[in-house]
Image (cartoon, rainbow, N blue to C red):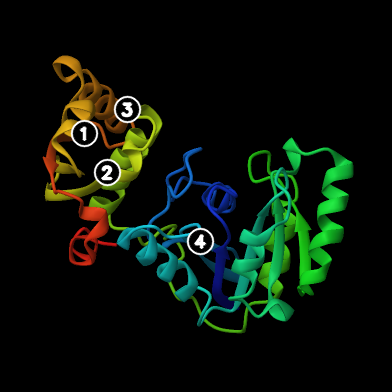
Amino acid sequence: MRSGFVSFVGRPNVGKSTLLNAICGKKVSIVSDKPQTTRNRIRGVLTTAETQLIFVDTPGIHKAVSALGERVNATAIESTKDVDVVCLVIDATQTFGTGDKYVSNHIDMSKAVVILNKIDRAEPAKILKQLQALSSLGAAEYFPISAKTGDGVAELTAYLATRMPEGELLYPAEMITETPDSVWIAELVREQLLENTHEELPYSIATRVTEYEPPRVRCEIVVERESQKGMVIGKNGAMLKIIGTNVRRQLPSGTFLELAVVVDKNWQQRPERVERLGY
């Protein structure tokens, strides 16, 4: 038996969460086309007859302009330590640039795996050019894949299994994620807010479950300004209704989900508030 940890790191919006979900065969991390969707480390577990792989999905590393940004960057960089394999995920549709190089500087690339994701959206000539540029990183292995279509994902997973040390199961074989149900519900609410709100509003929002007594769940939506509260609620509560309806579809039948919107002025800029909100 082999078992160990694999960390996915990279810039925002390169498809780390989509890849985690594809490997685990189940949605264990929320997904959005907006950068910085992931704020915490999310673990997904894949167990086969011979191997258990524990994957760590991390926040996208970016130029931080707030206490929240600094916190999520630190979370991502910390996730490159004490794991068996670090995977640097690159977007095949974007030019390999300073942001990717900045992330690579925090990794021992000689032992790392480079994953070129979104090859379904890039021309073959551009993929080849990207791989040629990425060869300068001196990584242990390179995998062009599409997390969306599944192309190359099985080959990547099989390779990562060979890199795991010998060892017993670290989690029960049936476990797919270690995220508590209450935290997952808060993430599902935030995912819908990312999907349905626009401009800078999604980045000013945090979510947390304050009461969890199934089937009753109360989730707070935290915003930074009073004006944002009205935008989240919507006219006659229309936005909250959309959010609640879409989240309930993903929860066990009969779940009563209460949503409340509260203002915590400039919480992103205040380290103590960022920590209290769970980041």
Element on which disc 1 rests? helix
Residue at mark 1: 228
Element on which disc 3 rests? helix
Residue 22 rendering spot, x and y as whole percentages: 58, 47
Closer to us: 175 or 202: 202
Residues at marks 4 and 3 touching, judged by CB atoms closer than 8 Å: no
Do we see residue 172 in this rendering?
no
Label 4, label 1: how many angstroms apart (C-alpha)? Answer: 26 Å
Label 4, label 2: how many angstroms apart (C-alpha)? Answer: 19 Å
Residue 140 rendering spot, x and y as whole percentages: 77, 75
Q: Residue at x 35, y 66 (%)?
A: 71
Q: Residue at x 73, y 50 (%)?
A: 95
Disc ID at residue 61: 4
Residue situated furthest top in the rendering:
236
- Quick one: label 4 or label 2, which is nearer the N terminus? 4
Q: Amino acid at mark 4?
A: Ile
Residue at mark 3: 246
